[in-house]
Image: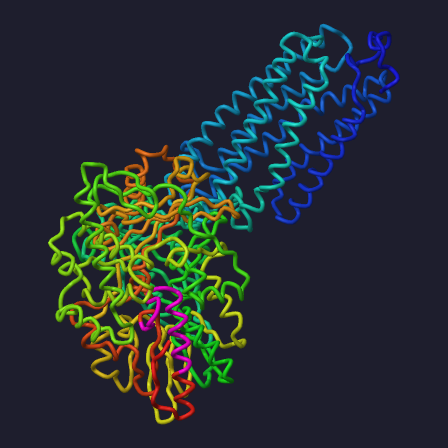
Amino acid sequence: MPDFCNTRDLSDPNIDWSFCPNIGAAYFYVILFALTTLAHIVQMFHSRKWYSWVIVVSGGMQTGAYVLRILAIQQPRNDSIYSTMFVLLMIAPVWTNAYAYMAFGRMVYNFTSDAKVLGIRAWRFTLLFVLLDVVAFLVQAGGASIASGDDLNNVMTGLHVYMGGVGFQQLCLLCFLGAIVRFHQHMRAQRPTQHRRKGLTLLYVEYAIVALISIRIIFRLAEYSSGIDSGIAKKEAYQYVLDSTMMLIALVLLNIWHPGRLMSGPESNLPSRKERKAAKKSGVQILGRGDEGLHEKHSGESSAGVVYVAQQPPNSTLITFAGQIGIRPDGSIPSDPVEQIREAFLNLRKCLDAAGARTEDLMKFTYYIVNYDSTNPQHRAPVSEFLGDHRPATTLISVPALALPGVIFEVDAIAAIPQLPPQQVDVAIVGAGLSGLQAAIDLQKAGLAVAVLEARDRVGGKCWSRDVGGKICDVGAAWINDTNQSRMFALAKRFGLELVPQNVQGRIVVDEGVGRFKAHPYGQLLGDGTDDAAIADVIRVRDAFEAACQQIDLHAAVVSGRRLRADLDDITFEAWIRSHDCCEDAVNALTIGARAMLGVEPRDMSALYFLDYCKSGGGYMQMRSDCKDGGQYLRIAQGTQSFSRGLASELTEGSLRLMSPVRRIEATGSSVVVTTARGVVSAKRVIVSVPTPLYKEIQFSPPLPPEKTQVSQSSKLGDYSKVILLYARPWWRSSNLCGLTQSVHGPFAVTRDSSVESAGQWSLTCFITGQPARDWMVLPAKERYEAVLTQIEKLFGPFAKVEPPIDSVEQIWRNEQWSQGCPCPVLGPGGLTAWEKVLREPAGKVHFVGTETAFEWKGYMEGAVRSGERGAEEVIKSLQGEEDVVYVM
């Protein structure tokens, strides 16, 4: 405790303290402010964002104020030390305020397309509010200086002046808050991207700073409104908690989410005055980076664009793409301009994927816009989403019309694809999904050199674990079990993956159409007195299907099927259901099963095919089960793509080639030449590990046998999409719901709880499949999302308080060039009878694997791995001269 802390000394007019100050607290705050200020200095130099000197000054003033506070405690009769401390403490927050304004102006420039907020240009907004802050600073500094004297009248006058400056600062803050809210509305209206998420993060920091400074201002106004001897002024704790701590938190927040890190690089800087003058003189309008990130456009009406020079890299192949318009696969054209432009870029993306080109391979971009309005550049957001950070040479041309009525946008492109040196191996494997990678590992263990050629920029095929706001979401295959899926369980242990049992605690919700709309205990369907007959019929037909399923011989499906019914492969699954004289509820129940399991309608596949498919997983009930031994028992906390990444990591270096779609497989004497988008590979044998319907994407020489071509042309992939909704908490569990729903009405057939508790990830996965998926896919993105939320509310709402999602991810597998559907190809009537053996047979030196060729767990990761093992065994035996291969797995 300081020596002057007694009643007599505190009443001494030569001592400025009206309370006994805590010198330990002053030392503590000196250290804290010094650390955050030092961090800001380092961040300023590291990011090279020199405007950060403003926040350094703020931190320096706070640090200096507390150094002087210590000295003022030690020298209580030294007026100059106390007065300087008082002034620094009063005016330092104004600099924090100024930095918030400066950072926000740069946010407007970096995260909007027109660099405007409330109609004000980013640089003018910054200048305006900084000038207002300077006024507030001067008024507060003047008032604080006057109030730091000894004359009581001057002190009161100074306080009134200071309070006027503080009040003006708060008024400016309220106006600033309005700008923040407007900017926030703009950000929320845009499609979320990684670039925009940075802007939202920084926006929340701005909200926090406004709140912290406002708390400090309200405190100071309350403190001095009653005069210098008010009770608040004599409580040191108030000053620490409501002033210094608020400013310390603001400085630390700006350390953690530093504007220079979230808006990095020289391109994020505001255009200089010289650059703005030059642009104005040359007729160029400077725009923001929020959408396309292209800073300039020509102000003329007939053409616009950014001029770059693009040179073809050495050892590359030049690819030109014809103009792409926003036409959907069904021939419809979106009426919404932005949605139509997005559809055009989706079509261009498919072209790039088919060519084996990355976005980064694009050299030249030309887009044509009907009656382009330079004041409303609607193309910029879709362009930004498509290009990311890549910037090819770009030209925009305004035209009066395009080829088709209603088309307002067209884009063409030129890409240069790098070519790799020729490679010679024992076995070339087409596809780096689980089946291809497992085959590669087995062949490598046998001493053979392999090359794995993958069309995508990743391994895994339909196992894709996407990062959504730091949480892992499996948008493809997601489940294994630890009993009858021995290969996958062994891989999980081999790679040290965390297994997450599927949540089945609580009730399931079943929509109208399978009995009445109500909740049931998991694993049961119960009548309520009004639908007992319908429920009984559902169970009767389901059990009949299960009984038939158990009589299928996986190695002789056609023969065993004929024993049950002669025309079992000649009729559709729907016809089989209706042949049981059942009610529509039974049809609906098994329709949900067909959609959820294969993404097709019961009318799309033969009854025998579906029986064989279900038997491969132990039966219909086991394949659909979320319990022990069931198809959906265990998930992977790190995501199922971890299996493929783990296998790929075991390949010999240089064995894996990504972005290498195979164009041609040509058998030439003793070798096979595989031509990819990025080079040529020669091998003794080839394993094709792509879905059967995608064989058409490869030119075979000599051609595949007619039967092989027919099975490829006749099999089809399901329409399968996922929307995963992420939540702040698992609200459904609070209402004794396990997250499982079933509905025949769409858009989704099933939901499941896909949460990972250890990662704090709470989510529901919605399976949008079959005909409802076909109808849903053609909707604009916003309407697709709203349709899912509407059905979530409809199904869960009567039983729980539905909370809004905090994030989401959508995956439409039909739109992926190298999937074209999911999860597994199906055969229509007559398919198994014609091609049961052909499906797995080699064609000369070319062998075929994939989950649809497995005998066990078709359509699942387990089936993919088992088929890869079979393919490797075939190749090893064929290279050893053993031609008669028995398919036993």
The residue closer to the viewer here, 159 or 76, is 76
Segment colored magenta? 853-873
Residue 559, percent from left and from top: 20, 76
- Provide the major secondary structure of the magenta segment: helix
Residue 137, percent from left and from top: 63, 24
- Residue at image position (18%, 66%) is 606
The residue closer to the viewer here, 808 or 60, is 808
Residue 507 counted in the magenta span: no
In the orientation shown, which residue stands out farthest toward the right?
3
Of the 4 image quadrants, the one containing the C terminus is: bottom left
The residue closer to the viewer here, 548 or 36, is 548
Of the 4 image quadrants, the one containing the N terminus is: top right
- Residue at image position (30%, 78%) is 840
Number of marks drawn? 0
Q: Relative to 519, is 546 above or below?
A: below
Q: Is residue 107 left or right of residue 47?
A: left
Q: Relative to 525, is 721 above or below?
A: below
Residue 4, percent from left and from top: 86, 15
Q: Is residue 495 left or right of residue 866?
A: right
Residue 686 appears anywhere in the view: yes
Residue 856 counted in the magenta span: yes
Q: Relative to 370, is 186 above or below?
A: above
User: What's the coloring here?
Assistant: rainbow
Residue 663, percent from left and from top: 33, 77
Residue 283 appears anywhere in the view: no
The residue closer to the viewer here, 681 or 165, is 681
